[in-house]
Amino acid sequence: MDPGAGKNGPNGPDNTPGAAGTGRGILSNPTRRTLRAGEIPSTMIECVHAEQCGGCPLIGMDYAQQLTTKRARVVSAIVHYPALELLYTRQVVPGDQIVGYRGRAKLIVSSTGGIGLYGRSGNHDVIDIPNCRVLAPALAEVTTMLRGLIASPPPEARGLLLPYDPHGGGVLRAIDLREVHMPSTTALPETTTTAQGNRVGVLLTFVLQRDRVPSRDELKEAGRALRSLLPRVVGIAANLHEADAPQILGPETMVLDGVPHAEDRIGPTYHVASFGSFVQVHRGQASRVHALITREIASLDMQLLIDETGTNRRQPRVLDLYGGSGAISIALSHAKNIVTMVESFAPAVQNARAAAEAQGLGKLDARVGDAADVVNSLLANNEKFDAVVMNPPRRGVSPAAREAIARLGAPLCIYVSCDPDTLARDLDHFSRLGYTSSELIPIDMIPLTEEVETVAVLKRAPPAQPRVIYEDDDVIVVEKGPHEPVENQPEYLGSLMQRCLRLPGVSNLKVVNKLDTGTSGLCIFARNEVARQLWTTALATSGRLIYLVAAKGVTPTKGAIARDLREGGRSYMARTRYRRLAVASGHSILRVIPDGHRPHQIRRHLAAIGHPVLGDERYGHVPTNRYFEEKHGLDRSFVHLIRIEIVHPRTGAKLLIESTLPGDLRASLERATGSSVIKFLEQKHALGENRASSMLPGEPSTAPMPPPRPLDRNSQPAIGPMPNDLAPPPPSYPPDSLAEPMSYASPDSFAAPPSYATQTAYAQPPSYAPPGGLPSPTITEAPTEHVPELDESPRTIRHAIVSDDD
């Protein structure tokens, strides 16, 4: 049966092309009425495997509903980023084919010889899917023939065709098929010719268990025998799968027979396809993406493209990052752009150069290397570009590459993403680096699934202003984003302080609490030096910084880590307390309070007890970090300063300042665990709110603020005592217990703060700088006091690690 066939014939009811929902995937109008502009016709696809196969999760929906679902996924990805709140998401661009479109397929081979995908049940049972509705006709034909050959393998090809059985023999684990549209001169059967005159062939890769692979000579002999039985296949290769690797394809591929690569046409140009290489599976939608990119670059401001003489328009210079096999680079070269392509896989770069030269496009400037490294080398050579195109893998653009791209300063950036979550994360970072987008363009690249391709067009703009949570006449408290230093550093394009100085009425800021570059959360800036010293003292004597952290593995329910930390050749006492709030996919979500504020204290202490922070490049577990980056988009340490509790040094009011969990950490957590853990933490008020609450001394409180924490001598701030007339009254409230939820006060018990522009809760402060300045610093020995209930648990004794090393 043809994969495009419907209920009553190969094209639909009455066997007429274009009938509703059952044709070869061409969208149709079953009511025969005239459709409004932009209207999606009602199209339902029926498949006998739909109830069991997990390959098409949206097949039970009308196609218009599918597009609505995909748009909602893009919208939900950006909703937790304040910098993206004005970003508009267009309607999803529908595909002209929704069955018979898939030009690349990786299919699992079961131990009984079935060829298909894992089922909806979530286990690893392979569902055999003959006559799959989404496979392109050429792939469906080859798959049908392979089923027969696996059932009755010819003797000379048994080395390739015996299905893998973990408890028996066999070597074949999966097949990888790729459709290629080649020039008409290729020797293939006439039935494979397309309407455009191209011949349709297939590159076939057998995925074999490495430890059971026969000799190379036996594999080549089996490849030759199979290719003679599969006339549509133009090349056969073997890929070696590692025993416990989660990916289908292994790192090594060998060509057994036929061509090592083939020309593949998309639109007016072609690129070179090789075994296992990336391709956008919907040829028609890929052509639309290429046209969209070309059109955006062609619309660049004419004034930006005037040559040195001031009279002629020069050709735009475009940097294509993550270029793959060169499909986008070649399409842009065909449109008269000067293109520099960057790709980390050397054979793909060689193929792209050859394809460009064969089509008369000249020598393509294609470079091998990591995107960030190549862009930094271009910066060192002072090279300029008019546009940057990014088409990264699912994990998105790396933080280092985003920094380098922003430094390049191109007027236009075009981001093509296959993952809305990592796209939103990267756009949020770009907004702080001086690039913004006004709309997102979703494209239905893989119909019947939840996946959606999205294009964002970014242009130069001022860096996004930070969100202000609290301010008064002394300080301003803002949210710091990830991958952003608090103060200027030469290796970073901007800083949080630079963005704060762009706020109206803000100047001459001083840092009170400093966060690591990869850490997000609340940051306090003082408006002058005296205010900085006042608030630093208040933070050390009456304040607490509360972090939300994800750590590897399952920690004890609560604990305290006492461990010396070395800095500059000296050892400093430090203690970190934590409570486990939840377990998510085998890892711990912690509420952490450091006593003292040594550099990297939380990250170093948690690594010392064998539970490093997820995503921590310096102290973390590399395989776990790589997994979370690839699967869940976590590209930095999972550390967020979610709450500051402090007694106001001028009024004596007890302040509680909170920040919500940022979008990137929320998305990573939700992808790793689903929505259940997020909902559980929200019920415990553990994810914070963007608010600042205060309670003056003497006011009743249903949940009192915690007592001050005496610090050891090495973590005492190096400033002198405050003048007596400015010292806050000593706090008098009961000791806290971390066993309680994170909500310390009801909304009614605190006065709501005024808006950002005006603060009326505090009177204008008098001049409090004493004559001659503040006294010289005095460091006092902190007394040993009662250890809170959190630290009394016997389970925490084993964490009392004291060491002189790092």
Image (cartoon, rainbow, N blue to C red):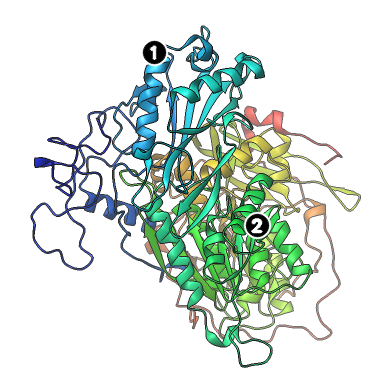
Horizontal relation, residue 126 to residue 41: left or right: right
SS class of the residue under badge 1? helix
Which residue appears at 40% of the width and 11% of the height? Answer: 152
Q: Position of residue 418 (x, y in %)?
A: 46, 51
Near-viewer residue (209 or 336): 336
Residue 127 visible in the snapshot = yes
Percent coordinates x, y for residue 641 in the rendering:
59, 56
Residue 88, horizontal then vertical, whole percent: 37, 68
The residue lying furthest to the right in this view is: 569
**What residue is drawn where x is 67% and y is 39%?**
612
The image quadrant that residue 122 belongs to is top left
User: What is the number of the mark on residue 151?
Assistant: 1
Q: How many angstroms separate mark 2 from mark 1 (CA)?
A: 44 Å
Q: Nearer the viewer, residue 311 or 502?
A: 311
For badge 2, the amino acid type reads Val
Locate the N terminus and report the quarter of the image it occupies. top left
Q: Secondary structure at mark 2?
A: strand
Q: Nearer the viewer, mark 2 or mark 1?
A: 1
Residue indicated by mark 2: 342
Are the residues at dot 2 and dot 1 in contact (C-beta closer than 8 Å)? no
